[in-house]
Amino acid sequence: MVKKTRVLIVDDSASVRQTLTAVLQSDPAIEVIGVASDPFMAAKKIQEEMPDVITLDVEMPRMDGITFLRKIMSQHPIPVVMCSSLTEAGSETLLQALEAGAVDIILKPRIGAADHLADSALRICEVVKSAAHARVKGIRPGARSASASGPQARLTADAVLPPPSGKAMARTTEMVVCVGASTGGTEALREMLEKLPANSPGIVIVQHMPEKFTAAFARRLNTLCEVEIKEAEDGDPVLRGHVLIAPGDKHTLLERQGARYQVSVRTGPLVSRHRPSVDVLFRSAARSAGSNAMGVIMTGMGDDGARGMLEMHQAGAFTVAQDEASSIVFGMPKEAIAHGGVDKVLSLDHIAREILAEDRRR
């Protein structure tokens, strides 16, 4: 029997602690072993029983979440998932948390329409289980997390757009790069993008993040990199030297307009349990760009992107996966490799170099 992922919830709001406990324990692979209203109480709980994952609020009395996160990372490295309200200001703080060692971000569950709450609960559970597999400060992934995800139906990219026609497109336009990442991807993407010069090929990225946070993430990257980076908007052109990041809670597709490309940003169901979905982006690249595309799949839990990368490969695209040693979680690259859609496996340090090399080969 696979052991459950044991979670400690740290939040000063009693209602949030109660709701989050109910959401997490609705998943048979998760067990909430305790709750705490502030970091000092959390520290005592950790001494009593070490959790596999901590969910941590940002704003709390006696000590803020970022300060507590840094203490955890320096004393008892445990996968930490930051829990935040949906605010633009808060999103900037959450990026600091990711840089300080947090594994991922979840939004506090909001009571509302049944379908929205269901989607929110699904993401929360998936992120927490993924976090249990993450390498934290050199710690190997935990073995407690189960892969079971409850009874929810898994939709494929068929729910958003039809499969590729099967006919590979000739290389007639500039190369466009499509990238997918999840757990650990925010820092991995920063490291990769910082290595790219201003004249790099156009790039479209799906990073699993909640809405609002992708805009702050794009702004942050734009201050660090030579390429221009922004959150994608419907109709944005894919241009050399520019990077578009799919907005949270929206699917982003690549479309061809004559000899150029643009993105389509749209609503739709969760695909491979995600919105945005890497599978949706990769399938659209297979359909619209064929051999003019390059696919890159990076650190993350689950199999989102594996089927889409195979479709890109079959359409003539060059495809790359991040290797296990440099991945925070090797789930997504491993699944893409297992599906047979990966041409090359590379460490994070070499992915940017390979993008530029493939661009020169064209």
Image (cartoon, rainbow, N blue to C red):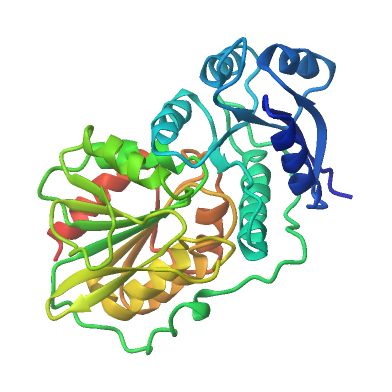
Residue at image x 11%, y 44%? 198
Residue in the foreground of this view, choosing between 226 and 44: 44
Q: Dividing the picture into quarters, in which one does residue 164 lie?
A: bottom left
Residue at image x 40%, y 74%? 283
Residue in the foreground of this view, choosing between 138 and 104: 104
| 148 sits left or right of 248 in the view | right
Task: State which quarter of the image contains the C terminus.
Answer: bottom left
**Residue 255 image position (x, y, % from top left):** 26, 75
Q: Relative to 186, is 77 above or below?
A: above
**Residue 222 image position (x, y, % from top left):** 23, 39
Q: Relative to 184, is 50 above or below?
A: above
| 14 sits left or right of 61 in the view | right
Q: Dividing the picture into quarters, in which one does residue 295 lie?
A: bottom left
* Residue 313 shows in this picture: no
* Residue 12 shows in this picture: yes
Residue in the foreground of this view, choosing between 67 and 289: 67
Residue at image x 30%, y 84%? 168
Q: Relative to 115, is 349 above or below?
A: above
Residue at image x 50%, y 71%? 307
Q: How many marks?
A: 0
**Residue 124 image position (x, y, % from top left):** 64, 48
Question: Residue placed farthest to the right in the image?
Answer: 1
Question: Residue placed farthest to the front in the image?
Answer: 112
